[in-house]
Amino acid sequence: MYDLLIKGGLVADGTGAPGFLADVAITGGRIVSVGPDLPGEARRTVDATGRLVAPGFIDPHTHFDVQLLWDGAAKPALEHGITSIVPGNCSLSLAPLRAGDRPGVIGMFQQIEEMPPEAFTQAFDWTWEDFAGYRAAIEPRLAINVAPLVGHSVIRQWVMGADAQQRAARLDEITAMGDLLRDCLEAGAVGLSTSFVDVDENGRPVPSRFAAFEELDGLCAVLGEFGRMLQIVPEFYDVDITIARIDQLADLSLAHGIPTTFSPVFDSQATPDAAPRALARVEEQFARGARVWPQVQTRPIDISFSLLRPSLFFARLPRWVRVLRLPLEQRLAALTDPSTVERMIADAGPDGGERLMGALIVRGGDRAPAGLAGRTLSSIAAERGETPVRALLSLSLENGLDVAFLAASRGHDDTARIGPMLANPHVHIGASDGGAHLASFATYGDTGYLFSEFVRKAGALTLEAAVKKITSDTAEIWGLKDRGVLREGLAADVVVFDAATIGRGAERPVFDMPGDGMRYIRDAIGIDTVVVNGEIAWSKGAYTDAAAGTICALN
Amino acid sequence: MDTTLTTQRRFLRPRIDETVEQLAARAMPDQPLENAVDRIKGWNLHIFAMRRPAGLLLGSDVVFVEPPRG
Amino acid sequence: MIADGQAVIVGAEITAGHDGQAEMVVRVRHENGVVAPVVLDGCTGFRLMANQGVGDLAALVGRPWRELLQQTILARTSRDDDDNDGLGGLNDV
């Protein structure tokens, strides 16, 4: 008798092969058979008729390190069909970390994740210092699988103390870092992450950025002993620097026999040559035999702002710029001065700001009335009997300026350009940043958007190719031993979804972080069932009590 | 398999404890130092404009020593 | 009048940054004739506009890039406050 039988679905097995009608039988957390009309009984059956059955999706770029300590499902990632995640990106992990170094590293995490302080003081007990201890702390409650990176910044902090953010390392310190990295890899780390961009809460570069190339080279020699991954975040805003980083990664990949990956790569109408040039360089380096995987995200980039802080969104409106750069008290005075307001309104154009501001979306999660969240300024203005520009000003003033507006899809938004990039065999779909930027934007639902935008709407990838991109390709790139394909003997990570509707919901604020902290999320659309290591973890819109997640075994 | 790499924008990595002036002199030994430093700064706003503290040279930096090639 | 061979701004626009903030893309024709974009974060972009006394991106076009850097962006020191961009005061709002 099987533990679980998923019956009658169209199986896209993760290899990219055409889908086929089949059952998937699972016992002991493993797939035991895939085929049509499998004989035998099961303790539990999922009717997948009319649905697609695929391997669980794998998200290679997340920052769930902290959240995993109280939420083993990394919600809402799992309900989007994600069954394995890679946390610890961008040089930051929660281990190895000495007790005395916690405050500094918490500051760095807060800079990236935007979590409230309570997340670090009330939601869990710090029971570990080393990597094996962190693993032991998260493992019992995991509902999702985890392939954790170890952060270069924390390794540096452990070995060099406060000097980690001051200077280059001595040779003996590089050796000690290598030994520490080796311990982490033996304890299950999937690789090392480093950053050339990130800063701490004071704006100072994180420790990894103080490393000379010789240090990174020494650490990659240790990665080479295990064949494990180096992840970096390059200066993505400048393609010439990004290309220099691609070349560095290629040299390290070839010298030490390791895979490397960098994220993010953005496409932008303002810099249309940037992404194509970066990807062309990747092609050249693959031709040399290097493995340098660029991570391209599926979702467009939005601009968000409130009148609490100046934003370049108004850079074409000189008077607005001047007013919004005033100190808060003077800014409020200007925004309540009738003659100033009339001039600002006039600047927005004869259409009352409809063209410039009508499509702005009120985000919620702030002091704006809850009923306005998700609505356009144009519709709110019509309801209030105002023009959009006047509605923006009055709504802000009525709520202490704490009203966030969103200008949707202002970068990485040209499907006709991004579709072929995502389909490129040398492009790694990722860079979701799940678990980070909590108060800025939702980092969930990128996989749903892959199917809704690039499979269904644009036809840039077939359904099977899209599944392959976020399952077996990811498992192979990262060396995840037994995941990414629906095949006998492999781990039973399965997602059952409606290929005609899978997508992502609208961004919405929730207050589910420790200390009633706010974050933006997106709900899943079209996902029926998510199975992790043979246990149903999410079904028909609800999480179960299953906690079958594990630390991923590696090749 | 074509293993030719196209030429990209030339850069240097800072040496340990190297100053901007020393790096500029290394990059453009034939140029007057002040001019070389000005050029280095203008080609590397990621270091000299957008970093706190501005101008702090880091061991991991990519420092361009020529304008974009296009 | 811009001398031949001098880097000059030929365009400026706003784009979306990775963190959801608006950023400025300045298009510069460099000394070698190559036109390339320079992406500036919000603080640096505001500083550029403020110190040049412009409130509109279009007014940056045609300005000599290197002079502008000397006068504004590169004049910044580590003691500079991000809000100290010369735009203070209620004049002319």
Image: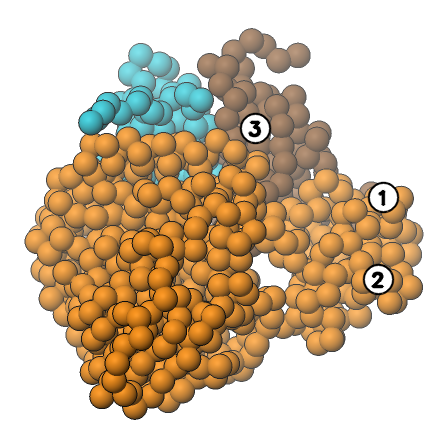
B26 and A265: which is toward the camera: A265
Between marks 3 and 1, how big is the CA–CA gap?
26 Å
Tell us which disc is closer to us: 1 or 2.
2
| Marks 3 and 1 on same chain | no
Q: Position of residue C20 (x, y in %)?
A: 56, 54
Decide: is C68 above or below A74: above
Mark 2 on the same chain as mark 3: no
Image quadrant where residue A32 sits: bottom left
For the residues labelled 2 and 3, say whether their Cβ atoms are less than 8 Å apart. Answer: no
Circle 2 chain:
A
Q: Secondary structure at mark 1?
A: loop
Of the residues under marks 1 and 2, which one precedes in the sequence? 1
Q: Which residue is mark 2?
A: A381
Measure how far apart labels 2 and 3 are at the Cα level. 36 Å
Residue at label 1? A349
Q: Which mark is residue C27?
A: 3
Q: Which tint was used for chain A?
A: orange
Cα–Cα span, label 1 and label 2? 16 Å
Vertical comparison of A502 with C61: above or below: below
Q: Position of residue A318 (x, y in %)?
A: 75, 41
* Residue A185 on image: x %, y %: 14, 63
Say which chain is brown.
C
Q: Is residue C37 left or right of residue B40?
A: right
Q: Chain of mark 3?
A: C
Q: Residues within 10 Å of mark 1 (few under 14, many from 20)?
A: few
- Residue C34 visible in the picture: yes
Assign a secondary structure to mark 3: strand
Q: Which chain is cyan?
A: B
Q: Quadrant of the C terminus of chain A?
A: bottom left
